Structure formats: structure tokens, C-alpha cells
Image (spheres, rainbow, N blue to C red):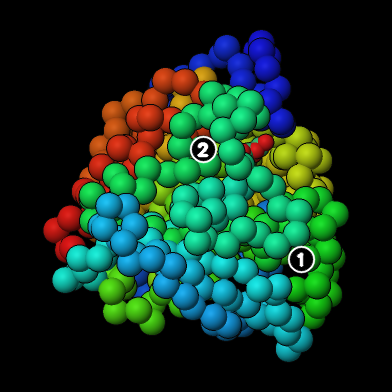
Amino acid sequence: MSILIACGPTKLTISRANLKPNGLAANPVLATDSTTIQDWEEKVRPQLQEDLERQVFGFLPDASSTQILDKTTITENAYGGQASIEEYTLTATAEFNGTSATTRPFKLVVVIPNDTTTPVPVIMLQSFCPNHNTVQHPGVSKPVGNGFSCDGDGFMSKVMNYVFGRYIATPPTEMILEHGYALAAMYPSEFVADRSERGLADLLALSKGHEDGETRWGAIAAWGWGFSRAIDVLEQDERFNKDGFVTYGHSRYGKSALVAAAFDTRVGAVISHQSGTGGASLNKYKKGESVGEITKTFPHWFSQTYANYAGREQDMTTDQHALLALIAPRPIFLGNARRDVWSDPNGAFRAAQGANTAYNIYNKQGLTQAKLNNYNPAADIAFWIRPGTHGVVKEDWPAFLEFMDAHYKEIK
Ligand code: GTR
């Protein structure tokens, strides 16, 4: 494998993902074709969740709540009069072992079509760029403190767009609105910083009642929990389709988007793009980023137990296909790129194959493809692979929206 560039910790290589499943299949999840839906939901799902919490993500809170501190309408005339922009200021409370703690205030920015005669699905997006980069309107608040910035059209911003694609910082909101969907943006660093020391401090402060340091939640779990806190708010609003809370994220937020859906059945579908290690890709026999590499570079993302499995992943009694299985029967989009071997598309494909058992319990097929490149947007697990590398490029959003339309058009 030739490493051409190491851009941040993401490595771009000249090798390409094999288009046929290549490597060991995922171990079966704790279910068989004869498991009933009731057994699956009451016995198997809780066990799979606990295994993933214990071995990968750390434990999520025992109870949670969300407080709306403020809500403002920024404009009713955005995107050529098509949409309104609203901004919430929220805090969220996590309870572990009877002890609760509350986050700093954080924002949720909602872009909603003005014509909502029927409730609309909402694509909930997390990004490493602040909300005012995601939703480009001067009224959108900038993060307080020294948040990451994707501002301006300067050199660094051009490099970022060149390397990681035109939609890395800003999604095509007009296109999303034209398809009839709302967008809700969060900048998760506002409540758990994406920095090793500050992030760990935030996580510790929010999990005071959790005694076991090895299994304390990591940022991926906390960001996933953040999606649920947004649903707490949006589900009170009649303009949104109750089955249409769709979590979307790229890369690290592709991981949190999956966690949200696996732990909160209110999530209606997931668009997880290039989620890689600790996301959709299997830990065992993996290509690309290893458990050792990800936990060393990002010590705040996962539980310490996951880091301890580095080099002995075979000892894990769970794997990432369980994360996908927990989302059944809801639709999942898994985005990939041929040269993004760092995110291990082949491992994600084999994980999807392994999750099919769970879909079958609901009389659903799950993944319908035999190879990585036979994209079927209407499948329960739609696996998309394009040429190129790690990023959100021109072809990606049309593919995401094709998946959305295949699953939501008839009920909109
Ligand atoms: C990388 C990391 C990946 C992925 C990516 C991202 O550096 O190695 O696991 O999450 O960051 O979020 O862009």
C-alpha cells in the first residue's frame, strides 16, 4: 500500500477497495432466522447494545432530557423564499447512576420548507464545521469560544474543498429543499469538544455517576446522543414527519449518525458516509485504519476498553455489524469511495451482509447487492461506492437524496 498524502490523520492511498466481498464474513449477530421480533427486541437488541457500549463506545446515559432555552426565527425568506431558518438554543442533561449533569448551551439550526402541507422528513446533520458554515445565513450564530472554523474563501478553505470535496463544509441546501426535505444542523463540539483533552474533560463532566473509567462514554457516543436530543425538540413540531428523523454525517459523524440510530428507535433512517473504523467497518481482519491507530489519534472518541483491544481485536465478542443490525428494520445508506481504503469499504460491506439476519427477522431483505458497486437506493441497506477518495463530492448528495426519495417519497 503506497501512502501518497497524509492529510490530517486521513491517509489517501493509490490502492483501491476490492469490489467483491474480500475477507472473512462478519460473525453472526446473536440471532437466527427463527428469532421472533419480540425476542429480538426484548432480549437480543439490549445485549448487542450493551456489548457495543462495553467494548467500543462506552456507556450512554441511563436517562436524558433536553431543555429549550431559546428559539428564534432568523428569516422566513431564505433560499429564494423557499424556506425559513430557525435557531434553537438548547442544553441537555445526562444521568448516570442517579447523578445528572448538563451540557453547555448549544445551537440547533433548522432550515424548513415554507410549503409543509404534509409533515416533512428532516435530515439532521452534524459537522466539524460550525453551523454558520453549514447554513450560510448571516443570522446564524457563530460558536462561542475557539471553535474550529471553516470560514471564508481563503487558501485553506480552497485546499479543504479541493481535498475533501465541494460539500465538505456546506451541504447543497437548495437541492435538499427541492426534494422536499428539511435540514437541521448541529456542531457537536459545542457540547463535547472534538479535542483530546477538552473533549475528555467534557465527557467526564457529563458522566459523573459512571464509575468505570474503562467504559466511560466517548465522544462518538455523546455526539450520537446529541442527535437524540435534537429529536426531543423536533418531535414536538407537527411540521416534521415522525418517521422522518434521518441522521446524516460524514466520517466521524458518520459514526455518530449510526450510533444515534442504533440506540434510539425514533431515528427513521441513517445516511452514514465513509464512517470507517468504529462506524460501519468491521474491527476484525480489517483494512485501513486500525483500532490502535484510531484510539491513539483520537483518545476521546471511544471507551478505553476499545483502545485496549488494539492488536487483539479477535478477542472482542462483538463487531460493527451489530451496530448495523440494531438499526433494522430502518433504512441505512452506507457511502464509500474506491480509494478511501482508510475507511475500509470492504469491511463495511461485510458488516452489512452480517446485519441481514436482523432485517430478515422483520421480513426485510437488508442488503440486496452481491458486490460493492451494485447500488440499490431502495434497499433497506443501500451500499454506495463511487470513484475517488475521502470527502463529500459532487456525486454524493444526489446519491443521498436518491436513497431518501426511494424511502420517503410515497409517504411524504
Ligand atoms: C480520520 C479518522 C477517521 C475519520 C476521519 C474524519 O482522521 O481517522 O476515522 O473519522 O478522520 O472524521 O474525517
Quarter of the figure that contains the C terminus: bottom left
Residue at the spot 59% in from the left edge and 38% down from the top edge: 152
Between marks 2 and 1 in the image, the one whose residue lies nearer the viewer:
2
Dot 1: few (<14), some (14–19), or many (≥20) neighbours within 10 Å? many
Name the one closer to the observer, 43 or 110.
110
Instruction: Find residue 316 and report its horizontal and vertical position in percent.
Output: 68, 49
The answer to whether residue 183 is visible is: yes
Instruction: Find residue 281 and report its horizontal and vertical position in percent.
Output: 55, 39
Instruction: Tell me, for residue 410, which label it has, or none.
Output: none
Q: Secondary structure at mark 1?
A: helix
What amino acid type should be assigned to the residue bearing mark 1?
A: Leu
**397 on left or right of 6:** left
Instruction: Find residue 162 and report its horizontal and vertical position in percent.
Output: 54, 24
Instruction: Tell me, for residue 203, which label it has, or none.
Output: 1
Residue at the spot 52% in from the left edge and 41% down from the top edge: 169
Quarter of the figure that contains the N terminus: top right
In primary-sequence order, the first of circles 2 and 1 is 2
Residue at the spot 33% in from the left edge and 67% down from the top edge: 76
Q: CA distance from mark 2 to mark 1?
A: 26 Å
